[in-house]
Image (spheres, rainbow, N blue to C red):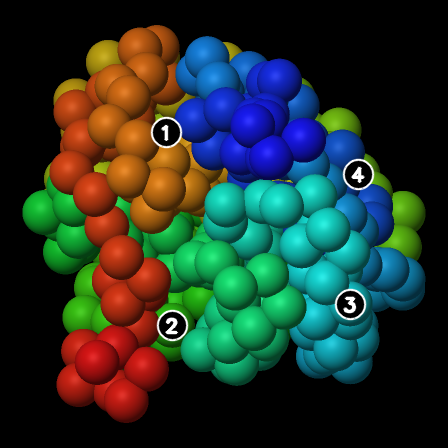
Amino acid sequence: MKAVSMYSAYGWRGKIGLILPSTNTVNEPEFWRLAPEGVTIHTDRVLLLGNATQESYDKMADALAQAAERLATAEVDIVVYGCTSGSIVCPMPELLDSMSAQTNTPACATAGAVIAALNALGVKKVAVGTPYVDFVNESEKQFLEDYGFECTSLHGLRLGETQEERRGIGRVPPQQVYRLARMIDRPDAEAIFISCTNLATLDVIERIEQDLGKPVITSNQACFWASLRLMGLPDGIEGHGRLLRECLDPITQSDFYLPGTAASK
């Protein structure tokens, strides 16, 4: 056994421990579609019930440590919270610390991955499209502004006033995402950001970039990119936007924090 103690039949380059809201049905398939050879995804869930409220996000945050503890037994190399709104509405440094303490690995949250992606692409002005209700949209706009980005426009589909609407985010067709991107684009926007890990985006990222002539960041694309770079994997992935194809340098967990904060040092 000692001779094969570091062996992994499939995740021999890296194992991603992914924690999702229980209703999310899109993040896992999109991660698997992006995974290069030798990278695997291992998933746990935190319960998501009811409409989109601060309380529902807080309950998921409270359950993160237990989910991370379970993933630690799979010997993952990184732990990821695959929820954009949940890592914006709840304090992201606390979420990262909670997960990392259980797995003794780097931790990533989608909102932080988006910040690192925007910085890697060198953009400051961004058009934002979401499926969220108003209070989440307002929180997201403030979050981006706190990190020094300007929202040239923001439009939300207002899905989340009921449990069924939240599930419905995963049923929004990619063609509607394309239309949303065209709607929010502005001449001064340097990039398009489509938010939410339960929104299917992979099939239209490249088309949006070609038609609008600017980079596109989506939650799952950015989060997977950040996971690879945190593990030190430089793979360029074709067909899903400039971020995955061109931004190959490693990042660190400190790239997720506000400059000058204790957590970033």
Q: Residues within 10 Å of mark 2 (few under 14, many from 20)?
A: some
Q: Which residue is mark 3?
A: 66
Residue 109, how many percent across, how many down?
49, 58
**Element carrying mark 4:** helix
- Closer to the eye: label 1 or 2: 2
- Closer to the eye: label 4 or 3: 3
Q: Which residue is mark 4?
A: 168
Residue 164 is tagged as: none
Q: Quadrant of residue 209?
A: top left
Q: Can residue 255 be seen here?
A: yes
- Closer to the eye: label 1 or 3: 3
Residue 143 is tagged as: 2
Residue 182 is tagged as: 1
Q: Quadrant of residue 262?
A: bottom left
Quadrant occupied by the C terminus: bottom left
- Closer to the eye: label 2 or 3: 3
Q: Residues within 10 Å of mark 4 (few under 14, many from 20)?
A: some
Q: Amino acid at mark 1?
A: Arg
Give me the residue at 55% from left, 53% from top. 79
Mark 1 or mark 2: whose residue is earlier in sequence: 2
Q: Amino acid at mark 3?
A: Gln
